[in-house]
């Protein structure tokens, strides 16, 4: 099991949380569950609704778009943070290429936290807006 500070260190790397205070990132870390997944497990499926944010603690995973590998993730990499806010369809399929240990945060838990903290909600939305392509604004 990861120590709380290690969870905080992993989560604060995600740009979505760049504007959050240390206390807010600690609150997000409290929501994170540590899970173990087998090699070959699909963590996300392209085109399906997104409902979780993942941070890889250990292991590797391939990222595929339209069946073509576009990236490989490793320890410390994260994905799915936009799903916490938008629930938009996944832009890629992510499949574990080794046994994986990951932190996962669900959209429901995260949205509950945001409802309790309007200031955090604003910071997260500002960070999200910075990541959107200009043509979508």
Image (cartoon, rainbow, N blue to C red):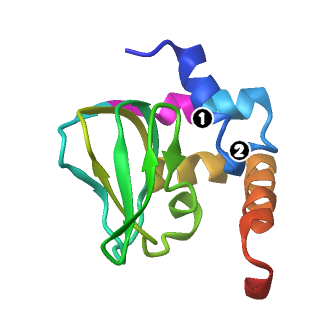
Q: Is residue 75 magenta?
A: no
**In this view, 43 is above or below 25:** below
Instruction: Work out whether residue 20 or residue 65 is closer to the camera in this orientation and state it.
Output: 65
Q: Secondary structure at mark 2?
A: helix
Q: Secondary structure at mark 1?
A: helix
Which residues are the magenta region? 28-34
Give the mark, 2 or 1, whose residue is nearer the N terminus. Answer: 1
5 horizontally vs 79: left or right? right
Contact between marks 2 and 1 (CB within 8 A): the answer is yes
Q: Is residue 32 magenta?
A: yes
Residue 72, x across and y down, in percent: 43, 49
- Tag 2 residue: 17
Instruction: Work out whether residue 24 or residue 54 is closer to the camera in this orientation and state it.
Output: 54
Instruction: Work out whether residue 124 or residue 18 is closer to the camera in this orientation and state it.
Output: 18
The C terminus is located in which quarter? bottom right
Which residue: 66% across, 37% down? 13
- Tag 1 residue: 11
Crowd class of label 2 (few under 14; some 14 to 19; many from 20; radius 10 Å): many
Residue 35, x across and y down, in percent: 30, 32
Examine the rendering and report whether any part of residue 53 can be seen: no
Residue 87, x across and y down, in percent: 48, 70
Which residue: 35% across, 72% down? 46
107 horizontally vs 49: left or right? right
Which residue: 77% across, 43% down? 18
Of all residues shown, which one is farthest toward the bottom?
Answer: 135
Instruction: Work out whether residue 78 or residue 113 is closer to the camera in this orientation and state it.
Output: 78
């Amino acid at each position: 099991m990861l120590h709380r500070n290690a969870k905080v260190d992993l989560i604060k790397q995600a740009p979505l949380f760049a504007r959050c205070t240390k206390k807010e990132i600690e609150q997000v870390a409290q929501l994170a569950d540590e899970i173990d997944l087998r090699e070959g497990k699909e963590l996300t499926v392209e085109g399906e609704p997104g409902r979780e944010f993942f941070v890889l603690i250990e292991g590797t995973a391939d990222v595929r778009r339209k069946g073509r590998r576009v990236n490989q993730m490793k320890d410390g990499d994260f994905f799915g943070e936009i799903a916490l806010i938008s629930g938009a369809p996944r832009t890629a399929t992510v499949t574990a290429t080794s046994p994986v240990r990951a932190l996962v945060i669900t959209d429901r838990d995260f949205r509950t936290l945001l409802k309790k903290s309007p200031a955090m909600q604003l910071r997260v939305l500002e960070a999200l807006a910075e990541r959107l392509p200009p043509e979508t604004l």
